[in-house]
Image (cartoon, rainbow, N blue to C red):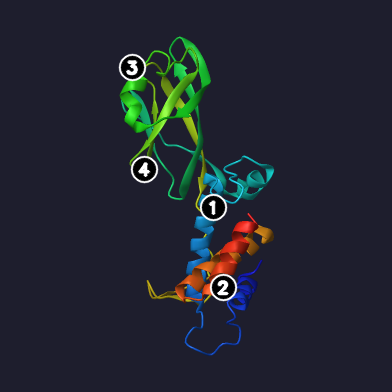
């Protein structure tokens, strides 16, 4: 769906198509609200806070709706003695998994099962014989800290390669020649929404709800919120 169509639909539902009063909605407001709506909608789908409590990959619809955001990123990992560490990508939103290949002098490299663990339990996990990293069993764990993925080896093996599979941030739309008042910079390109048209329709209702709340339009706020949630 084109940005021009999104803009028309948003103004239509806010009853601002022909309005000449002080409540006219400018292009930057639509861009800001729509991009905010994208992030809020994605986070809600991943976490399962929606009308049917469906979270990440729990149904075919969730898998289909969110697959466009799944990415594979080759981690540039560095050896930190008893763990390997790699920076998260700039557009990182949520963890999915890490695939690693481990090696040891006595054996060929092998894939490992990596579990995401809590940083608070790090010392207990490294000490517990049933949970600590094990090349023999092909299992280890990782934690997230300070914008890094830390994959633990307990100095039992080396990691040859690591791929992070994650949900990225949705691409922000941009409207050509729209001036952002926060930066005072004019947009020089048109960036369309990446989601399917049926999802964009839901995002439009989300956007209308945000803008209606900003201008204290209670009826449009209620309608936008209820419609967006009902169609999740």
Label 2 to label 3: alpha-carbon separation:
56 Å
Instruction: Say which element carries label 4.
Output: loop
Provide the residue designation for mark 1. Answer: 42
Q: Would you place residue 22 above or below residue 63 in this image?
A: below
Q: Is disc 4 surrounded by few (<14), some (14 to 19) or many (20+) residues within 10 Å?
A: few
Label 4 to label 2: alpha-carbon separation:
39 Å
Provide the residue designation for mark 2. Answer: 220
Left or right: residue 9 compared with residue 210:
right
If you read the primary sequence from the N terminus, does the residue marked by circle 4 or circle 2 appear first? 4
Classify residue 10 by image quadrant. bottom right
Provide the residue designation for mark 3. Answer: 127
Q: Nearer the viewer, mark 4 or mark 3?
A: 3
Are the residues at dot 4 and dot 3 in contact (C-beta closer than 8 Å)? no
Q: Nearer the viewer, mark 4 or mark 1?
A: 1
- In x, y percent, where is residue 95? 48, 40
- In x, y percent, where is residue 12? 63, 78
Label 2 to label 1: alpha-carbon separation:
22 Å
Instruction: Say which element carries label 1.
Output: helix
If you read the primary sequence from the N terminus, does the residue marked by circle 3 or circle 1 appear first? 1
Q: Is disc 1 surrounded by few (<14), some (14 to 19) or many (20+) residues within 10 Å?
A: many
Provide the residue designation for mark 4. Answer: 147
């Amino acid at each position: 769906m084109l940005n021009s169509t999104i803009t028309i639909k948003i103004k239509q539902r806010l009853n601002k198509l022909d309005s000449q009063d002080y409540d006219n909605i400018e292009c930057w407001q639509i861009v800001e609200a729509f991009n905010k709506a994208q992030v809020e909608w994605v986070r809600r789908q991943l976490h399962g806070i929606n009308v049917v409590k469906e979270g990440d990959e729990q149904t075919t619809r969730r898998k289909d709706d969110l697959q466009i955001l799944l990415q594979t990123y080759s981690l540039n990992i560095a050896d930190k003695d008893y763990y390997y560490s790699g920076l998260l990508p700039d557009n990182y939103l949520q963890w999915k998994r890490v695939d690693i290949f481990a090696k040891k002098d006595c054996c060929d490299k092998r894939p490992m099962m990596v579990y995401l663990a809590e940083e608070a339990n790090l010392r207990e996990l490294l000490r517990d014989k049933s949970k600590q990293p094990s090349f023999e069993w092909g299992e280890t764990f990782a934690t997230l800290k300070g914008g890094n993925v830390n994959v633990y080896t307990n100095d039992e093996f080396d990691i040859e390669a690591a791929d992070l599979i994650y949900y990225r941030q949705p691409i922000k739309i941009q409207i050509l020649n729209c001036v952002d008042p926060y930066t005072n910079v004019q947009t020089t390109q048109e960036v369309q929404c990446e989601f399917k048209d049926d999802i964009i329709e839901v995002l439009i209702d989300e956007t209308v709800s945000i803008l209606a709340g900003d201008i204290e339009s209670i009826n449009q706020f209620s309608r936008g919120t209820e419609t967006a949630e009902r169609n999740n």
